[in-house]
Structures are given as C-alpha cells and as structure tokens.
C-alpha cells in the first residue's frame, strides 16, 4: 500500500432527482480536490436517492449510461476518482443497488450490493460477484450498508488483498450520535479483525418518502481506532490520510496481525451431529 488521501461525503439526496444530485456532487468533489484528496466516496444511492419502494424504477439507468457519462466528465475535469451510488437497471429489467468507481481515465468499475436488506427484497436483485479495484496502487473493496453486517465478506476481500474497505450507507432513523453508536458496534471490528482501513459515510436529511438520514461519516484505521469523523448532520466532507506505515505496523506485528493465522480448513469441517 502507498499513502493516500481520501474524502468521504455526507450527502443529502433528493429522491428520483438524478440531475439535481449530480449538480450538488460537483461542489463537494471540487472541495475534496482542493484539499488534496485523490478519491471521494459518496453514500449509497446518492445519485438516484434511496427508497425500498418500486418507484425507484423511474430513476434506474443502465451502466454505462447518462449517469456514468457525466461522472466520467466530472472525474476527468477534477482529476479525482469518484465513488458514487445509484439504482442500476440491467438488460433483463432487474434493479440493483450499485456503487460506481469512476476514474479520470474513463474506467468504470461497478459493485452491486450483495446482501439485500429485508425491506428491499422484491425491489432489488442481489449482486453475484465481489470485485476489488485499485486507486494509485491501493487495493480496495466496497460494501453497501447491510453488507457490512456480514463478516465473511470482509474476510474474503482481505484474503484477495484489500487494504481499504469503503462502506457507503443509506441508513435512516436516529440521530448522528445514535448512528455513530450503532456503527461503532461492528465497523471497527471489520477494520480490527482484518487489519485494514474502513471508510463509512451516510446520506443526510429527509427525503420525499419521509425517511430521515442522520448525516455521519467516519474513518477507522487498521487497529480499529476512529481517526476521523463528522457527526454534524450536514452535507459535508471529511478528509483523511491513509498511512502505509500504519498499515505495515499492524501487518508486520506477529501478535497484532491475526489474519495469517486463520485456519479456514478447520472452519469448513462438519461438526458432530447432535442426537435428537
């Protein structure tokens, strides 16, 4: 891993108003670039807005399409990698909760949410692949909101070489302090257990369906410590330096880097059957 400066956005999305949301993103992207960030991560479905209702079909688009065309121009203009979320429609009319990685070169990588939350089932289809991507030599993974509750996903991404996990959310209800307490139960564990960085951010404000999103963002280091956070509940960015030395200190320490000492063959063995 190399040192890298990242930005994470708290963003207020208007439901089904794609053009408005893209316009609003531009200012935050410029702020991130002005502060030296080479990548900015926006929340889950920030481009189309979030809903678990079928009305999302009105805003869903194919990839590539008009949204990705515009994002490519924005990434090239500011020479920054953009991670942003939308509802994606595929060729068989299935709808996915997708997150884009758009590079200044025009390269696009897509992550489709793997674990569909119970209220989302029947509207969204789950993704079936686990892509990783590279930014300036940093190997990264994405998990969307509900995905972060499944430790096996972080384990697999780490096994495939991830140094950083981006975890964009569209998580409603509660205050920023409530959401911070909730995230603090499991997100630091993903960082600590796998000795990597975790970056999480949420939507903010109230959308047209009456969902209220507590605006929060946080960065967690490979030891599970929160090194940057924003609980202001306002549209904003946080900027953090991810240090290769900090990652190396953990991963070179024989008692602090747990991952190489896993025994996956043991975990796959079938245990003794209980008698009835």
Image (cartoon, grey):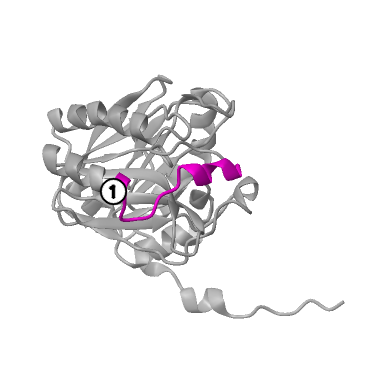
Residue 137 among those drawn in magenta: no
Q: Answer above or below: position of 51 versus 140.
A: above
Q: Which residue is drawn at 53% across and 40% down?
A: 185
Relative image position of residue 243 (x, y in whole percent): 20, 44
What residue is at 28 percent from the left and 48 percent from the top?
68
Image position of 81 with respect to 126: above or below: above
**In the rendering, at what x and y percent does residue 2 appear?**
15, 51
Q: Is residue 184 above or below residue 60?
A: above
- State which region is magenta: 53-68
Residue reaching furthest right? 276
Q: Residues within 10 Å of mark 1 (few under 14, many from 20)?
A: some
Q: Which residue is label 1 attached to?
A: 68
Query: Residue 260 at what x, y percent from top left?
Result: 35, 68
Q: Which of 85 and 90 is in front in this view?
A: 90
Can you tell which quarter of the image residue 78 is in?
Answer: top left
Who's the residue at 19% across and 26% down the image? 31
Please tell me whether residue 159 is drawn above or below residue 176 in the rendered image. below
Q: In this view, does 193 lie to the left or right of 253?
A: right
Question: Residue at coordinates 38% horizontally, 56% vertically from top-left?
Answer: 111
Does the rendering let one see residue 214? yes
Pick whichever, 236 or 110, lies toward us.
110
Left or right: 5 in relation to 191 = left
- The quadrant of the picture occupied by the C terminus is bottom right
Q: Nearer the viewer, residue 146 or 269?
A: 146
């Amino acid at each position: 891993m190399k040192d890298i400066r990242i930005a994470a956005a708290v963003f207020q999305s208007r439901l089904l108003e794609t053009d408005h949301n893209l316009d609003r993103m531009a200012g935050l992207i410029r702020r991130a670039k002005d502060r030296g960030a080479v990548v900015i991560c926006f929340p889950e479905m920030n481009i189309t807005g979030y809903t678990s209702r079928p009305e999302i079909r009105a805003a869903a688009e194919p990839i590539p399409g008009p949204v990705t065309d515009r994002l490519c121009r924005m990434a090239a203009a500011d020479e920054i990698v953009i991670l942003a979320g939308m509802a994606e429609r595929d060729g068989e009319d299935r709808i996915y909760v997708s997150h884009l990685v758009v590079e200044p070169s025009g390269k696009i990588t897509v992550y489709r949410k793997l674990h569909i939350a119970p209220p989302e089932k029947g509207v969204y289809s789950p993704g079936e692949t686990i892509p990783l991507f590279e930014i300036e030599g940093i190997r990264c993974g994405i998990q969307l909101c509900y995905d972060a509750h499944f430790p096996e996903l972080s384990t697999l991404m780490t096994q495939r070489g991830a140094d950083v996990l981006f975890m964009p959310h569209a998580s409603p209800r509660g205050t920023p302090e409530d959401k911070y307490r909730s995230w603090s139960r499991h997100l630091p564990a993903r960082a600590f257990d796998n000795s990597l960085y975790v970056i999480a951010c949420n939507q903010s404000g109230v959308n047209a369906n009456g969902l209220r999103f507590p605006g929060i963002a946080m960065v967690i280091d490979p030891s599970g410590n929160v090194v940057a956070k924003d609980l202001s509940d306002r549209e904003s960015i946080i900027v953090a330096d991810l240090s290769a030395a900090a990652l190396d200190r953990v991963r070179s320490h024989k008692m602090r880097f747990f991952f190489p000492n896993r025994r996956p063959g043991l975990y796959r063995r079938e245990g003794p059957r209980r008698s009835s």
